[in-house]
Amino acid sequence: MRIVFFGTPAFAVPSLNALFRSGEEIVAVVTQADKRRGRNRTPSPSPVKEFAMHHGIIILQPANIKDPAFLNELFPMKPEIIIVVAYGKILPPSILTLPPYGCINVHASLLPKYRGAAPIQWALMNGEKKTGVTTMLMDGGLDTGAVILQEEIEIADEDNAETLSKRLSDIGASLLVKTMQGLKNSSLKPIPQSGTPSYALPLKKENGRIDWSTGAAEIFNFVRGMYPWPCAYCHFRQERIKITRVRIINGSGIPGRVEKVSKEELIVGTGKELISIIELQPEGKRPMAAAAFLQGRRIQEGNFFDEP
């Protein structure tokens, strides 16, 4: 089947690879523009673009997917189906109606829960115990299309957005291959979504600030959901500190105050119970254990993160 694949981040690569390995005809990949990274602001290709370059697949990177110049490139390719995995932009009706088999999306939630841009992060931040992947036939709404297949998995306490994303991306790739097979042999029929929808709003860098007045369980989930981006953060003596791993400790304290400190332990008060900081990243440095952070810093009980 002639496929045009829309995708950008690492999450999309297993799905693209699964299609490639299954022998489907991938006529082009559409991905977002290279982002400038590092101190030198060097343009860096997306993971999907890197895969396409390695396998000799045509690459399109439109600044605007409604641009007639882009559409004049896409339409003559005559895709039978368009696959969309974390592309990052909403497709216009002119593209949604182009392929005879429609546009199929791989979405990292059990729709209609967590429609939107950051379903993995919000599932973790909300303390969900289960999540999954949905393949759906796209329509003009925000993740409102009819469901084709779903697969559910449990969320482990050790999961963060990075580890959970990796697991869901692999499941999504397998589910996509099954979806393609079912559509080709007409054994699968899209079913309208049912249930109460919820939404996973896009995240911004400033959304990572920790609110110590919330409970330890909420902060634990917040840190998991925010890692690796935008990453939970706070300030200590005017220094911005990313908090990358924590655990919940029984007890009580004042939100943001250092309640206990030793050579290897840094325990902070919250609105309910305590948080032990296991790993953190000072500004401009690599992530480090709490013990390494405490070396050379005169941190005492009664000091505050984000001083009131």
Image (cartoon, helix red, strand yellow):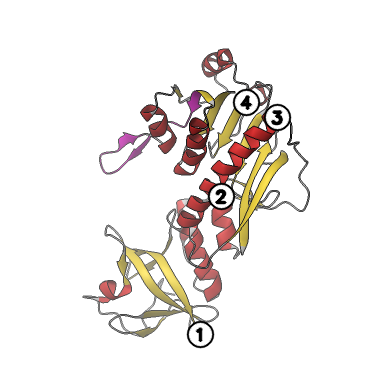
Q: Is mark 4 on a helix, strand or loop?
A: strand
Residue that numbered label 1 is attached to = 250
Residue that numbered label 4 is attached to = 81
**Quarter that holds the C terminus:** bottom left
Which residue type carries mark 2? Ala
Q: What separation in Å lies between label 4 and label 1 (alpha carbons)?
A: 53 Å
Q: Earlier in the sequence, mark 4 or mark 2?
A: 4
| Residue placed most toward the observer, 186 or 199 | 186
Q: Nearer the viewer, mark 3 or mark 2?
A: 3
Q: What separation in Å lies between label 4 and label 2 (alpha carbons)?
A: 25 Å
Label 2 Cα crowd, 10 Å radius (few <14 / some 14-19 / many 20+) = some
> In the drawing, what numbered circle is on residue 185?
3
Q: Earlier in the sequence, mark 1 or mark 3?
A: 3
- Residue 38 drawn in magenta: yes
Q: What separation in Å lies between label 3 and label 2 (alpha carbons)?
A: 33 Å
Residue that numbered label 2 is attached to = 118
The vertical placement of 86 against 166, above or below, is above
Q: Which of marks 3 and 4 is in front?
A: 3
- Which residues fall within the magenta stretch? 27-44
